[in-house]
C-alpha cells in the first residue's frame, strides 16, 4: 500500500482502478474518502498484477472499512498481525497463563508460521505444524500453550473479517501426542535391531534413489550411530569434528524457516559432545580429508550441494517404500535417533552420560531408553542367583524351599 491510513467507520468510499503500462504491477487500485474530522480527502492504494486482483483488493477494503478494520491487516503476516492484536487476543488471561502463552508464541508459533500472511494459514498448515512440535519432543503442555495462543490470535482475525473461520482449531493432536508418548515408553519399538539392519537399510536407500548417491546411506548411518537428528547431521561442519578424540561437538541444526532453510542453535540451545564410534570413523575421515582447508564446509550435503532435511532424505530415497519392503514400515527418519539412543542404553551407558549425548532437557525423557531387553533381564536373574548363593554360605542366612 502507498499509505497506511486508518479508514473511519461509516464513511463513504469511492474507488477506481488505473492501468499503468510497462510496470511489473500495472493495475493500481485506490479507494478515497473524506475524513469526517478534518474534511481532508484521504486515500489508500495498492499495485497488483491483474485487474481481478485490483477489484478483489477494493472489495476487501470496503468490507474492512464497514467494520472499522485497518486495511493494512489484510496483507500482514501472522507475526505482524499477532503483534498488533496481542493485547486484545490475550485479554482476561491471568499472568500464570499469559506467560507460557507468550513463550509459545515467540518460540514456536512465530518461527513456524509467522512468515505466512494471515489469510494463507490453513487448517492443514496448523495441523502439520503441531505434528512437527510433537515430533520435535515438545512437551504436552508446551504444545497446548502454543496452540492456545495461536487460536486466540486467529480468532481475532475472524472478528476483524480477515478470515471466515479459525484454522487453528485443529483436533486429534492430543491422541497423536499420546501415540508419540506410548512409542517413547518402548523405544525398542522404534529402533533398528542390529548394526546389520542399519547397513542393509542404508544400502537399500542408496539403491532406490535415482542418483544412487552414497551420501544418503552415510547420512543414515551417521545419524543412527550418533543418535542425532537429521537437522543436526545436516548442520555439522568440518571444524565441529575432533579427530584426536573422535568426538563431534553438536552446535547447530538445519531447519525450515522464513524464506527457506536456516541454520540455528541446537534444540536445547547448548552445544554437546557426541562420540564417533569406530564403525563410522573411516567414513568421517574420508569426508574430512576431501574437505582439507575448509573448516566451515558441511560434512554432509546432497548430490547437488544442497542442505539435507528429513523431507529431502525421504523424497530422494523413497524412504517409505524402502522401509516397508524391509519390514520396518513404522520407521521414520527421527527413529534413527531412537536407534542410537537405544543402542547406547543397551551398551550400559550411564543415564547421566546418555542424557548429555542426547541433549535432553529432562532426565525422564532419557530414562525411557533404559528399558531392559531380554538379555539384560536374564543377566539380572543370574546376578540375583549368584547373590543368593553367596548369602547361602555357612555364615549367612539360608532360604528353606518347601
Image: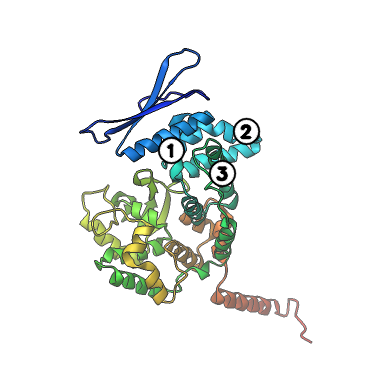
- Say which residue appears at 55% left-offset and 65% top-offset: 183
Secondary structure type for disc 2: loop
Q: Is residue 151 above or below residue 182?
A: above
Density class for disc 1 (Cα within 10 Å; few <14, some 14-19, many ≥20) is many
171 relative to 390 in the view: left or right: left
- Say which residue appears at 38% left-offset and 58% top-offset: 310
- Picture coordinates of residue 275 (x, y %)? 40, 59
Secondary structure type for disc 1: loop
The residue tagged 3 is: 151
Labelled disc at residue 91:
2
Towards the viewer: 377 or 225 = 225
Q: CA distance from mark 3 to mark 1?
A: 15 Å
243 relative to 131 in the view: left or right: left
Labelled disc at residue 174:
none
Mark 3 and 1 residues: CB-CB less than 8 Å, in contact? no
Density class for disc 2 (Cα within 10 Å; few <14, some 14-19, many ≥20) is few
Density class for disc 3 (Cα within 10 Å; few <14, some 14-19, many ≥20) is some
Mark 3 or 1, nearer chain start: 1
The residue tagged 1 is: 77
Q: Is residue 143 above or below residue 346?
A: above
Amino acid at each position: 500500500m502507498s499509505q497506511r491510513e486508518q479508514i473511519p467507520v461509516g464513511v463513504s468510499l469511492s474507488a477506481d482502478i488505473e492501468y499503468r503500462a510497462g510496470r511489473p504491477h500495472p493495475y493500481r487500485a485506490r479507494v478515497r474518502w473524506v475524513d469526517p474530522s478534518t474534511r481532508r480527502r484521504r486515500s489508500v492504494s495498492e499495485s497488483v498484477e491483474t485487474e481481478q486482483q485490483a477489484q478483489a483488493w477494493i472489495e476487501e477494503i470496503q468490507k474492512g472499512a464497514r467494520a472499522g478494520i485497518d486495511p493494512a491487516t489484510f496483507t500482514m503476516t501472522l507475526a505482524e498481525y499477532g503483534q498488533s492484536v496481542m493485547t486484545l487476543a490475550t485479554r482476561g488471561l491471568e499472568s500464570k497463563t499469559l506467560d507460557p502463552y507468550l513463550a509459545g508464541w515467540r518460540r514456536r508459533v512465530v518461527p513456524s508460521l509467522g512468515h505466512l500472511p494471515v489469510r494463507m494459514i490453513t487448517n492443514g498448515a496448523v495441523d502439520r505444524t503441531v505434528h512437527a512440535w510433537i515430533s520435535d519432543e515438545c512437551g504436552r503442555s508446551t504444545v497446548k500453550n502454543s496452540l492456545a495462543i495461536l487460536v486466540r490470535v486467529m480468532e481475532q482475525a475472524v472478528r476483524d473479517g480477515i478470515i471466515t473461520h479459525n484454522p487453528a482449531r485443529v483436533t486429534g493432536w492430543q491422541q497423536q501426542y499420546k501415540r508419540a508418548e506410548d512409542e517413547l515408553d518402548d523405544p525398542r519399538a522404534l529402533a533398528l535391531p542390529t548394526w546389520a539392519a542399519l547397513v542393509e537399510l542404508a544400502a537399500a536407500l542408496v539403491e532406490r534413489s535415482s542418483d544412487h548417491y552414497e551420501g544418503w546411506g552415510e547420512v543414515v548411518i551417521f545419524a543412527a550411530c550418533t543418535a542425532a537428528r537429521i537437522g543436526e547431521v545436516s548442520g555439522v561442519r568440518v571444524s565441529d569434528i575432533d579427530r584426536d578424540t573422535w568426538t563431534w561437538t553438536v552446535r547447530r541444526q538445519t531447519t525450515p524457516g522464513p524464506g527457506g532453510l536456516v541454520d540455528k542453535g541446537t534444540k536445547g540451545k547448548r552445544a554437546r559432545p557426541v562420540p564417533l564410534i569406530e564403525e563410522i570413523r573411516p567414513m568421517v575421515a574420508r569426508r574430512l580429508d576431501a574437505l582439507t582447508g575448509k573448516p566451515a564446509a558441511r560434512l554432509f550435503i546432497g548430490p547437488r550441494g544442497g542442505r539435507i532435511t528429513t523431507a529431502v532424505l525421504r523424497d530422494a530415497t523413497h524412504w517409505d517404500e524402502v522401509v516397508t519392503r524391509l519390514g520396518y514400515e513404522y520407521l521414520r527418519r527421527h527413529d534413527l535417533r531412537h536407534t542410537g539412543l537405544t543402542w547406547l542404553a543397551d551398551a550400559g551407558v550411564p543415564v547421566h552420560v546418555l542424557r548429555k549425548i542426547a541433549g535432553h532437557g529432562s532426565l525422564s525423557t532419557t530414562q525411557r531408553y533404559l528399558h531392559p531387553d531380554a538379555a539384560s533381564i536374564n543377566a539380572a536373574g543370574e546376578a540375583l542367583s549368584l547373590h543368593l548363593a553367596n548369602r547361602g554360605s555357612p555364615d549367612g542366612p539360608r532360604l528353606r524351599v518347601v
